[in-house]
Amino acid sequence: MSRSWNPRSRAARVMAGTATALAVLTACGGGGGADAGKGTANEPVTITFWGWAKGSKDVVQAFNASHKNIQVKFEEIPSGTAGGYAKISNAVKAGNAPDLVSIEYSSLPEFVSSGALQDIGGEFTEQDRAKLLPQAVDLTTLGGKTWAVPFDAAPQAFYYRKDLFAKYQVAVPKTWDEFRSAAEKVRKADAKTRIATFFPDDPTTFEAMAWQAGAQWFKAENDTWKIDTTDPATTKVAAYWQGLLDADLVHKNASFSPEWTGSLKNGTTIGYLGASWGAGVLKGTLPEQSGKWAVAPMPNWGTPASGMLGGTSFAVTKDSDKKAAAVEFAEWMSTTEAGVKARISSGTSSAFPAATALRPVAKSVFDASYYGGQDIYALFEEAGASIDENWAWGPTTGTTNTTIKDQFGRIAKGGPGITDAIKAGHDATVAELTKRGLKVEG
């Protein structure tokens, strides 16, 4: 039985400390008042929105077609870690940022701490927040203020080629021990084929693995940030993946790269350790393989558990004078049946809404024939309920992840390893927090 995430106990243990620690970081919200830029029949407004999530263009088109007082001008930007966050940050510094931006939960504290966003608590009320998964709301509440509208949750999942698993007579692994055994069996069956891929360019995938195992890298107590990346859970996960790499049991390719995609197309990679949104990614990337894929719970360490890999929120930039309109659009995307239908009916999104009441809507719109009619949303529900409650993100995720990514790229047999990369990320994080004048332990 999966262990539910008690959001209020998490708030008591984690967010109270985080509120204090972020108090010295957060800037007062800029922009207009509660009614600024709301849009009326006599004075319609146009807001600008930058994002990259699948189906965003379709959502904007649907909103514009159904609203007269507010219109949205959309610009698709690279995903956050692929350059989107740098583009947003540069635009904020230059004073020409859009009104609304997509920001993953992991990066929100950093944007808040840099003063790039506005507090939207006056527009995104307690009644509005009650429609959403409380733990997603917690991830967008920092320093006692509301900084973004949560859109989705992103529990982990394991996607696999059921036809090739059957061909190689490999059982779908339920535990990480079984995953290694399955990886060995796959390689033995076909010397060129691997069960999955280690992404050297994507620290967030590793962080989700550590999260699943029970790690807690960032913890705020009173006015001090405690950083711990050498805990038993992280050490176990690092050693496990180092072992897979050293034994050549997984590929090592950049995520969503031509090499990775090519290996999926030719069947030399037969599994993908991703998140709920990955179902839409595979469907859009490999349409010719419809009916060949299935989804399973993430392998675990003996008890069903999941981390969160990604997860999108919508935030208003500090200089926007159209905050009310921007929040109205963000809420429409996140909390209305029309918004969810518009995104998922595009055929490229498998978003798992933070608005729990809209999950049946998402399920009904998503074409599950790609996965042989499997009820993937039921699986996401189970995975979401098992997300470990103790993880929190720190205010220097960019520094942490950039350093780990650089070090992951140097991993080589007999050379630098995963543990070295995590240590470098730890040291860079402590140095950056210290540079900002914050108290740090770790």
Image (spheres, rainbow, N blue to C red):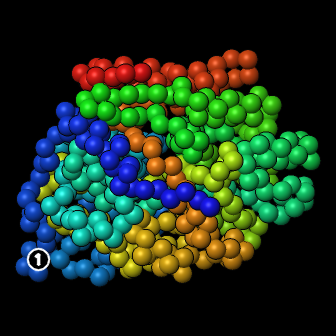
* Quadrant placement of the N terminus: bottom right
Compared with 69, 200 (above or below) is above
Q: Residue at x 65, y 50 (%)?
A: 303
Between 7 and 158, the one nearer to me in the picture: 7
Between 10 and 125, the one nearer to me in the picture: 10
Residue 302 in the image, given as x and y percentages of width and height: 69, 47
Between 189 and 354, the one nearer to me in the picture: 354
In terms of image quadrants, where is residue 133?
Answer: bottom left
Local SS, label 1: loop
Between 285 and 350, the one nearer to me in the picture: 350
Relative to 90, 386 lies left or right? right
Q: Crowdedness of circle 1 by 10 Å Cα count: few (<14), some, many (20+)?
A: few
At label 1, which amino acid type do we have?
Thr
Q: Residue at x 33, y 62 (%)?
A: 74
Residue 227 in the image, given as x and y percentages of width and height: 42, 27
Q: Is residue 87 visible?
A: no
Residue 13 in the image, given as x and y percentages of width and height: 35, 43
Q: Residue at x 54, y 76 (%)?
A: 363
Residue carrying label 1: 40
Compared with 99, 177 (above or below) is above
* Quadrant placement of the C terminus: top left
Q: Residue at x 30, y 60 (%)?
A: 149
Q: Is residue 305 visible?
A: yes
Residue 217 in the image, given as x and y percentages of width and height: 46, 33
Relative to 14, 156 lies left or right? right
In terms of image quadrants, where is residue 63?
Answer: bottom left
